[in-house]
Image (tube, helix red, strand yellow):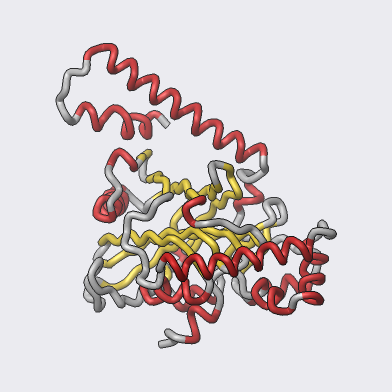
Amino acid sequence: MLDILKCIYIEPLLMRNIDFGPHAYILIILSAVLSVIAITATIYSAIKNKVISKESHNSERKWSTGDNNLDELIERAGYAYDKNQDIFYSTIDAWQREYGYRRLYDEAAAPLGMIIDCEPIYFEYDGKRWLIEFWKGQYDLVTGGEIGVYVAEKDSLGITGIFDNTIYSAVKDEDMLSMIFYLKKNGEVLFARRARHWWLTGFKLGEFSEPWELTMSLYITLKDKTMRDAFIEGLNKAGYSNRKIAVSGNTVAIEFKEPHSPQPATRITETDRIIQKKNKMLCEKYQEITAPYDKLPDKIKAVREISPEIYKKIINIGKGKELFLKKFKS
């Protein structure tokens, strides 16, 4: 924590060689103390709402929904269910891992009903091109967030930031990173995720959000100092100043609220509005149908009987096969 505070408040000022006098340093220390209080309050809120427990962060513990058929459908979709937080999340062995990442996936998201902010961070490390990307927003019938870790050979096709049709592979097990994120909506924690993973995600069913309402607090532990520094350089190139980046050891922390990177060309204000209107209606319909029920299997059963269209979307939550297979199968 002290390293993070030093990084954020003290070092940027000392590097400018300005004599601020004793009173200014007191103000700096007070600002740091207030930040500690704010961070502590966020963590306390997360603990209080049971989003920071070891169980809720163990990505490989697969809770049962209480319905074996539903469990199987969710697993086929590449996800599992966390009953403590009432969220779905991607498993390490999800089928999506085979398809990696390419920029066209982000371009295809909005037309498929996903109005999400994306933030790709490119950097080079260990002779390869790396990509760590963050996403947050409305995925049709769910509010969610993601961190993905991908790698490609340095001589891959594409010019980063100009034209990049590079096909990135999901990292192998030995290159997975320890990551944490809190997804907050208007300042309130919706859920948290923590795991060593290649694709750390969380999706809350029936929750409607605008991307600008959401903030992701991210903590990513890189493999070593060299990788950490390369990632920070990538953040700088994307538009994050050092004052917005906190570092402790090989762990880098940032907040992702407003994307710094150019967004997909398919993110157009008018079409976003139309798609979000549809997404909101879907969420409201889901809430209406499931209001009499407490348990997820009962909710899903009611949706299946009353609204097959919504049921189909539920069993294809998040980034489903339509995104990966229909247009861009190689």
Could you tell me which residue is drawn at 58 percent across and 44 percent down?
Answer: 189
Whether residue 139 is visible: yes
Quarter of the figure with residue 23: top left
Q: Quadrant of the N terminus?
A: top left
Residue 290 sits above or below residue 84 on the image: below
> x, y (%) of residue 218?
45, 48
Could you tell me which residue is drawn at 45 percent across and 86 percent down?
Answer: 327
Q: Quadrant of the C terminus?
A: bottom left
Could you tell me which residue is drawn at 16 percent across and 29 percent down?
Answer: 16
Residue 157 sits above or below residue 6 on the image: below
Along the horizontal axis of the image, is 50 left or right of 128? right
Quarter of the figure with residue 120: bottom left
Residue 219 sits above or below residue 176 on the image: above
Along the horizontal axis of the image, is 143 left or right of 198? right
Q: Residue furthest left?
A: 17
Along the horizontal axis of the image, is 120 left or right of 51? left
Pick whichever, 225 or 106, lies toward us: 106
Quarter of the figure with residue 298: bottom right
Pick whichever, 260 or 145, lies toward us: 260
Whether residue 220 is visible: no
Pick whichever, 9 or 168, lies toward us: 9
